Amino acid sequence: MENLSGKNVVITGASGGIGAEIAKLAAARGANLALLARSRDKLEKLKAKLESSYSSKILIYKLDVSETDNVSATFARVYHELGEIDLLVNNAGFGIFRHAHEADIEEIKAMFDVNVIGLIACTSAVLPKMRARRSGHIINIASQAGKIATPKSSVYSATKHAVLGYTNSLRMELSDYNVYVTSVNPGPIATNFFNIADESGSYVKNVKRWMLKPEYVAEKVVGSMLKPVREVNLPGWMNAGSIFYALFPRMFERLGKKAFNQK
């Protein structure tokens, strides 16, 4: 269980949800952690909990990844205070479900700033050193929404399509440098993500029986660490749907119309 012993892991969006669960499992396996999030109070509580259970070094940093001017400075501090970064988990992100004609331009910009630009900025902060060391692992938390777009998720899906495109290109660029790049594509997860994304609560109510547990997703993510895993797709049946969609998009959209309108 201590396959991460002595490794330094950075996690964005670490104050709750799957970010916090990934932190718990990584610490249990011996990793030292740099936890980044907007809420320092939540990070302080998580740090105290982890330090009471594990001997790992736990550092916390207040960071909004959309504020790209602060990203470089924060990662410089991480390198100075923690050491070389072995793994980066780009988990920070959010979504808002609206019909395309109702989408607010400021919300659109905010989603792209966090989900795409922030992710790229954090990755750019570690790439030179990982390439130079010829060692490292970057894990980008994307979504099945990046493979199958559905009504009321046009902007969110667009951001996750962008993450997958970036991740796939990055993987090929780093293939000769012994740096692994993994995309994680989960379906809906039972976290506070939907407090913002689904204000009415109707989507959560409709898909509750299919929602993934954050602990389960985190287990799969941590299990892929330091391994040449291309993708982690959850649940399996939803990923099978994305393959069918890629092959037969017109039929898939026609047959799945009722299911897609759950939001």
Image (tube, rainbow, N blue to C red):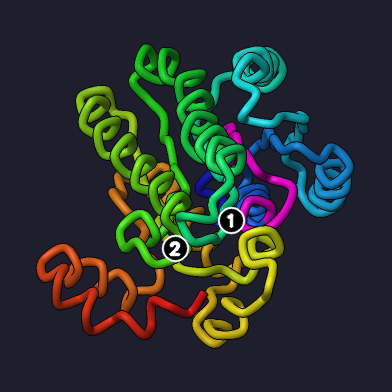
**For residue 94, above or below residue 34:** below
Q: Residue 96 has which mark?
A: 1
**For residue 48, above or below residue 144:** above
Q: Which residue is mark 2?
A: 186
Image label count: 2
Q: Is residue 153 magenta?
A: no
Q: Nearer the viewer, mark 2 or mark 1?
A: 1
On the picture, is 127 further left or further right than 87?
left
On the picture, is 2 further left or further right than 48?
left
Q: Where in the figure is residue 35, as x and y percent of width and height?
A: 70, 37
The single residue placed furthest to the left in the displayed view is 247
Q: Is residue 95 visible?
A: yes
What residue sits 49% from the left and 29% below the top?
117
Quarter-of-image position of residue 162? top left
SS at circle 1: loop
What residue sits 26% from the left and 74% below the top?
241
> How far separated are the C-alphas under marks 2 and 1?
17 Å
Sequence-wise, the earlier of marks 2 and 1 is 1
On the picture, is 28 further left or further right than 178?
right
**For residue 252, above or below residue 154:** below
On the picture, is 109 further left or further right than 135?
right
Q: Where in the figure is residue 9, as x and y percent of width and height?
A: 58, 36
Q: Quadrant of the N terminus?
A: bottom right
What residue sits 23% from the left and 84% below the top?
255
Q: Along the line of sight, which residue is nearer the eye, 175 or 97?
A: 97
SS at circle 2: strand
Contact (Cβ within 8 Å) of mark 2 with mark 1: no
The single residue placed furthest to the front in the displayed view is 101
Q: Residue 223 has which mark?
A: none
The magenta segment: 5-20
Q: Amino acid at mark 2?
A: Pro
Q: Is residue 12 magenta?
A: yes
